Amino acid sequence: MTFQLLIYPDFTLLFPIKKIGSGMHFAVIGSLARINGELDKSLLARLDTLYTVGFYSAALRCIDIIMLPVIALLDSSLVRFFREGEKGIYHVLILTRKIIIIPLIFTLLGGLTLPILANLLPLILGSSFNESATVLNWLIFLPSVFVLRYFVVWIAYATQHENLTTRIYLLAIFTNLGISINLIPKIGWRGTVIAIYSSEVTMILFLIFSIWVAESNIKRKWFYSK
């Protein structure tokens, strides 16, 4: 056996093609998520003023603060998602139903505190950040939308639909790009906020629909192969 492996080595043991493909999808998805997250500020700097980027970025930092404990909780649950994914999508959905309540309630409450935080921002950062308070009032529901997107993406991961996630991330980026280019010159940072909400909701809805279609096809193929 050892001699045979030396003469005819099985390189699939060293380079499992399927796992490399999955790893590439995760790497690409991570890059696309980063691009989608930074696209708004880049376009705002290009199509508006750096002053606008400054107070808009300050408002987004408040969203990041709300999301920090939520992301920590969700990251700690990722292994459980993959474990349940081996049993099938229904087990993943049961786990999602158990976990999603706390992050959703936390982000909804956090979002509702944003108007209070908005009044404090100019006192903390200075009067030049008065506009940040207005931006925060537009971002009340963004943390909850982020939570929904996280869970839908992880359902796709756990059920091995990374290829769908990659395509839909691209769709979300183009949605964000198209809306931002059209609206930022007309209504400034408000166009950016509309673009973010639109791209996030697009991703959530298309992923849910795509996973549902893919899982239905898998079950249909399994049924006819019996």
Image (spheres, rainbow, N blue to C red):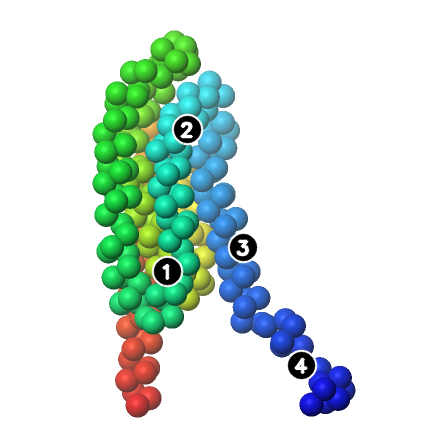
Q: Position of residue 17 (x, y in %)?
A: 58, 72
The residue tagged 3 is 27
Q: Earlier in the sequence, mark 4 or mark 3?
A: 4
Q: Nearer the viewer, mark 2 or mark 1?
A: 1
Nearest the eye: 28 or 190:
28
Q: Earlier in the sequence, mark 1 or mark 3?
A: 3
Q: Position of residue 70 (x, y in %)?
A: 35, 41
Q: Position of residue 1 (x, y in %)?
A: 69, 90
Displayed quadrant of residue 218: bottom left
Asked if disc 1 and disc 3 are in contact, CB closer than 8 Å, the reply is no
- Relative to 27, say whether 134 is above or below: above
Instruction: Say which residue appears at 36% left-offset and 66% top-offset.
Output: 85
The residue tagged 4 is 10
The residue tagged 2 is 61
How many residues crowd mark 3 within 10 Å: few (<14), some (14–19), many (20+)?
A: few
| Amino acid tagged 1 | Phe
The residue tagged 1 is 81
**Element on which disc 3 rests:** helix
